[in-house]
């Protein structure tokens, strides 16, 4: 997810999932975030264009699976919408029985974070002698 993003909605099925986010980044900043994130070796950015409504459309592939990212302005909140649509990843037959993140989201269950961030206490100031 891009910085300062919040979840708006999701839709989909067991085969495909679309997630809508809102970010405080400007449209071009959000598009550039995904251009950088969708680079080799993990991803291959196949297409970078504008649709007929002026939204930035990115199409990428990873291990043969497609991902579409659409980025457009949210004028109501002076923000940017990002919609990601892709195929739901299938679990390998011998993997754990836990659902993948995409399967959990498609089922309406947000995955638990892998770790909880606990900030460090600020350093104690020592008076000068």
Image: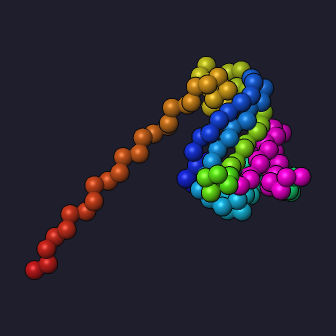
The number of discs equals: 0
Q: Is residue 114 visible?
A: yes
Would you say residue 41 is visible in this rendering?
no
Q: Position of residue 84 (x, y in %)?
A: 73, 42
Q: Is residue 117 above or below residue 108?
A: below
Horizontal and vertical percent position of residue 53: 85, 52
Residue located at (19% from left, 68% from top): 125
**How far across and how far down the image is residue 105, in percent?**
63, 29
Q: Residue at x 68, y 55 (%)?
A: 75
Query: Which quadrant holds residue 16?
Result: top right
Q: Nearer the viewer, residue 85 or 126?
A: 85
Q: Position of residue 28 (x, y in %)?
A: 72, 62
Q: Is residue 8 magenta?
A: no
Using residue 26 as the reference point, say whether residue 124 is left or right of it: left
> Quick one: which residue is furthest to the right in this view?
52
User: Residue 111, relative to residue 52: is it above or below?
Assistant: above
Magenta region includes residue 58: yes
Q: Which residue lies most toward the front here?
A: 76
Q: Is 54 placed left or right of 89 in the picture?
A: right
**Residue nearer the viewer, 84 or 81:** 81
Residue drawn at x 79%, y 44% is 68
Magenta stretch, residue numbers: 52-73
Residue at x 76% of width, y 47% of height: 69
Quarter of the image with the C terminus is bottom left
Q: Residue furthest bottom?
A: 129
Color theme of the render:
rainbow
Using the image, determine if residue 118 lies above or below residue 34: above
- Main SS of the magenta part reads strand
């Amino acid at each position: 997810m891009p910085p300062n993003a919040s979840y708006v909605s999701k839709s989909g099925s067991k085969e495909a999932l679309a997630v809508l986010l809102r970010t405080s980044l400007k449209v071009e900043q959000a598009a550039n975030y995904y251009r950088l994130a969708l680079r080799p070796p993990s991803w291959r950015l196949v297409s970078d264009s504008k649709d007929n409504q002026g939204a930035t459309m990115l199409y990428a592939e990873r291990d043969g699976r497609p991902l579409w990212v659409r980025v457009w302005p949210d004028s109501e909140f002076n923000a940017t919408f990002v919609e990601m649509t892709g195929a739901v990843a299938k679990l390998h037959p011998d993997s754990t029985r836990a659902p993948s993140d995409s399967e959990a989201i498609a089922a309406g269950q947000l995955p638990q974070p892998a770790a909880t961030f606990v900030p460090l206490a600020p350093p104690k100031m020592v008076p000068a002698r």
